[in-house]
Image: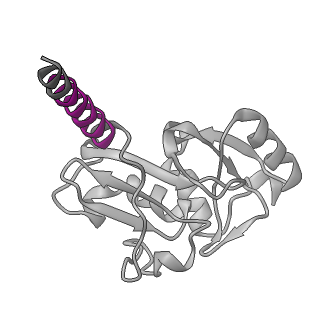
Amino acid sequence: MERRSFFKAAGGLCGLLWLLVTHSLSFGEGFPKAGKDDRCPVCGMFVHKYPKWAAGFVFQSGARYFHCCPKCMLHNLHQVSKYQPGETSENIRQIWVTEYYTTKQTEAREVFFVVSTNLVGPMGLDLIPVRGKAAAENLKRDYDGELILSLDQITPDEISKARSGRLKRKSDL
């Protein structure tokens, strides 16, 4: 009788472990890392050279795209059909950025982007991702920032200004 109890308990434990593993794979899969051959689809730079600035997204299909900086990723996000023909932004299952202070990959919907700072990334002026409103306010103050925006507040116009090196408002020039 004891032997059956052991096997029954072991079977139950294996089932529980399988459930935990499959659950963590489907919901907490982490963020992908760029390899040596991964290039930014927007500017063509090798992403692995800029790990403190890297950003990217993953489509439902599993296709992964890495970007050298938040600015390139945000530009791509607003023009998915141009850079990933046949895909749409609705098919993106994960969007991540490298948070400025911790340099850890973070879900892009969970950070604020500080606009018009004097910080320079691999492609020049950028939109700086930070976790938490207080951290965003500090970065804005310390680096002469102008705006704090969430991911869904960033417009193509803000991205165009950053890409052209003109993040400051016309009234400031």
Rendered location of residue 9, percent (x, y)? 21, 24
Would residue 159 be found to the left or right of residue 8 on screen? right
Tell me what residue is drawn at x 30 percent, y 61 percent: 64
Residue 56 falls within the magenta-colored stretch: no
Would residue 81 be found to the left or right of residue 122 on screen? left
Would residue 116 be found to the left or right of residue 85 on screen? right
Q: Nearer the viewer, residue 136 or 76?
A: 136
Tell me what residue is drawn at x 22 percent, y 47 percent: 60
Rendered location of residue 121, percent (x, y)? 66, 70
Magenta segment: 8-25
Tell me what residue is drawn at x 73 percent, y 53 percent: 169
Residue 19 falls within the magenta-colored stretch: yes
The quadrant the N terminus occupies is top left
Rendered location of residue 116, percent (x, y)? 73, 55
Height in image: 77 above or below 122? above
The quadrant the C terminus occupies is bottom right
Rendered location of residue 57, percent (x, y)? 37, 55
Q: Nearer the viewer, residue 135 or 80?
A: 135
Quarter of image, res 80: bottom left
Residue at the extreme right:
142
Height in image: 77 above or below 147? below
Tell me what residue is drawn at x 35 percent, y 57 percent: 79
Height in image: 15 above or below 29? above
Height in image: 44 above or below 28? below
